[in-house]
């Protein structure tokens, strides 16, 4: 998995993780947020590396499907882009605060 894909999946996970099964969520959080290898996760949960891999792959597909249907990540990216343009043009303090809040998520 390339860095761009890894980062995008990590962001989608922050949006939709509660829609995954508990096991998928646990595996994916360990892998994408805590930087565990598949082998480390497998050892911790006493399952095969292949089981971890399959769960993570299914989880990624589910996250992508939710984004296609709901589009929250894309919508937030678009809003942030528009706010940056407004801020660049008008320098409004309230806009700057909103941008900082959105970037912190």
Image: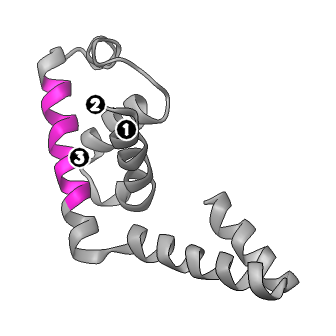
Q: Nearer the viewer, residue 102 or 24?
A: 102
Q: Position of residue 10 (x, y in %)?
A: 42, 45
User: What residue is at 84 percent from the left and 86 percent from the top?
Assistant: 92
Q: Is residue 5 above or below residue 94?
A: above
| Disc 1 element | helix
Q: Identify the image quadrant of the N terminus.
A: top left
Q: Nearer the viewer, residue 51 or 7?
A: 7
Indicate whether residue 53 is drawn in magenta.
yes
Indicate whether residue 83 is drawn in magenta.
no
Position of 49 with respect to 8 (left or right) is left
Which residue is under mark 1? 6
User: What residue is at 35 percent from the left and 47 percent from the top?
Assistant: 9
Position of 55 with respect to 15 (left or right) is left
> Nearer the viewer's eye, disc 3 or disc 1?
1
Crowd class of label 2 (few under 14; some 14 to 19; many from 20; radius 10 Å): few
Q: Which residues are magenta?
A: 51-64
Q: Position of residue 66 (x, y in %)?
A: 24, 66
Position of 91 with respect to 62 (left or right) is right
Which residue is under mark 3? 60
Q: Position of residue 100 (x, y in %)?
A: 74, 66
Marks 2 and 3, the one that precedes in the sequence? 2
Asked whether the beta carbons under mark 1 and mark 2 sit within 8 Å of each other, the answer is: yes
Whole-angstrom CA distance, mark 1 to mark 2, is 6 Å
User: What residue is at 75 percent from the left and 81 percent from the top?
Assistant: 87
| Disc 2 element | loop
């Amino acid at each position: 998995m390339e860095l761009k894909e890894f980062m995008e999946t990590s962001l989608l996970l922050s949006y939709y993780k509660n829609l995954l099964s508990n096991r998928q969520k646990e595996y994916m959080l360990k892998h994408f947020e805590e930087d565990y290898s598949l082998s480390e996760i497998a050892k911790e949960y006493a399952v095969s590396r292949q089981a971890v891999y399959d769960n993570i792959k299914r989880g990624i597909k589910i996250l992508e499907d939710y984004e296609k249907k709901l589009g929250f990540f894309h919508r937030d990216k678009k809003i942030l882009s528009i706010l940056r343009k407004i801020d660049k043009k008008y320098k409004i303090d309230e806009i700057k605060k909103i941008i900082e809040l959105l970037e912190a998520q």
